[in-house]
């Protein structure tokens, strides 16, 4: 890895972690995806029920295979291919009462605000309330200077890329550009802006000094 970038990411991450602390959220930094994965695995105690929420970043690092192999850990996984749509919804409802949710965020600002956009809302709902603990693994490519930039990043960058990833029949898949569609498969329905939490350190952000997901 480029040493200059590594130093830069670490300095910026240190700043964000301090800002998260002011908002009663926790943060930590891992320079590599591999290290982040190891550290997240260590944060899962035996007997935990873990809710898997949609995130390309976590699939990229092969996290779910490792979590499922942990002794005494149960994964609530709405993405199992054998599930019917109704069963997938039921898993999402179950996930809201899990011990731990692991996911990512669509964007994080330099002062520690989390910005997300969901189609169905299960991910943003669980981030706000439900699971006792939330771990979000976030590549430094998702860091933006401020809230305005975060909103633009999510709608005009992350959302079209996620549409292409899922192969959804939405116009941005053809053009790469959001035209604020009204299709039934629109994934841009529920915004979430998290500026802090009353339950101290319920949300832990694992910042990663590499590019992960969209
Ligand atoms: S609103 Fe529609 S066109 Fe715009 S990014 Fe979302 S799904 Fe794509």
Image (spheres, rainbow, N blue to C red):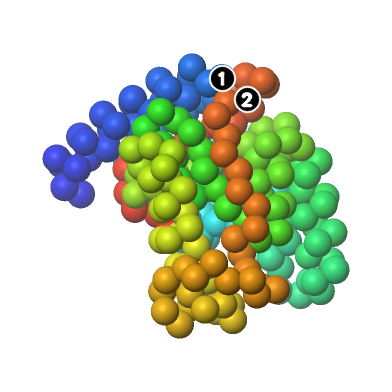
What is the distance, in whole Å, between disc 1 and disc 2 at their CAs?
6 Å
Which image quadrant: the C terminus? bottom left
Name the residue carrying label 2.
197
Specify few, some or many for label 2: CA neighbours under 10 Å numbering under 14, 14-19, or 20 or more.
Answer: some
Q: Nearer the viewer, residue 118 or 53?
A: 118
Q: Position of residue 133 (x, y in %)?
A: 67, 33
Quick one: label 1 or label 2, which is nearer the N terminus?
Answer: 1
Q: Nearer the viewer, residue 47 or 95?
A: 95
Residue 35: image x %, image y %?
39, 42
The residue sitting at 55% across, 56% down in the picture is 55
SS for callout 2? loop
Residue sitting nearer the eye, 155 or 49: 155
Q: Residues within 10 Å of mark 1 (few under 14, many from 20)?
A: some
Asked if the residue at tag 2 contacts the one at tag 1, i.e. Cβ–Cβ closer than 8 Å, the answer is yes
Query: Where is 134 relative to 83, above or below?
Result: above
Which residue was labeled with disc 1?
A: 24
Give x and y (percent) for residue 113: 48, 33
Q: Is residue 56 visible?
A: yes
């Amino acid at each position: 890895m480029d040493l200059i970038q590594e130093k830069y990411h670490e300095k910026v991450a240190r700043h964000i972690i301090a800002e998260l602390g002011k908002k009663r959220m926790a943060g930590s930094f891992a320079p590599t995806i591999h290290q982040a994965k190891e550290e997240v695995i260590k944060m899962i105690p035996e007997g935990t029920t873990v809710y898997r929420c949609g995130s390309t970043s976590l699939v990229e690092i092969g996290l779910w295979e490792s979590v499922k192999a942990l002794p005494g850990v149960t994964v609530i996984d709405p993405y199992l291919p054998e599930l019917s749509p109704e069963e997938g919804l039921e898993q999402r409802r179950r996930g809201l009462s899990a011990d731990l949710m692991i996911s990512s965020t669509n964007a994080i600002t330099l002062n520690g605000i989390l910005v997300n956009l969901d189609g169905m809302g299960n991910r943003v709902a669980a981030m706000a309330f439900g699971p006792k603990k939330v771990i979000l693994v976030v590549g430094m490519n998702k860091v933006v200077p401020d809230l305005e930039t975060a909103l633009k990043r999510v709608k005009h960058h992350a959302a079209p890329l996620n549409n292409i990833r899922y192969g959804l029949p939405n116009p941005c898949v053809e053009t790469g550009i959001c035209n604020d569609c009204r299709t039934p498969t629109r994934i841009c329905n529920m915004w979430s802006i998290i500026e802090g939490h009353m339950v101290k350190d319920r949300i832990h952000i694992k910042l990663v000094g590499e590019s992960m997901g969209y």
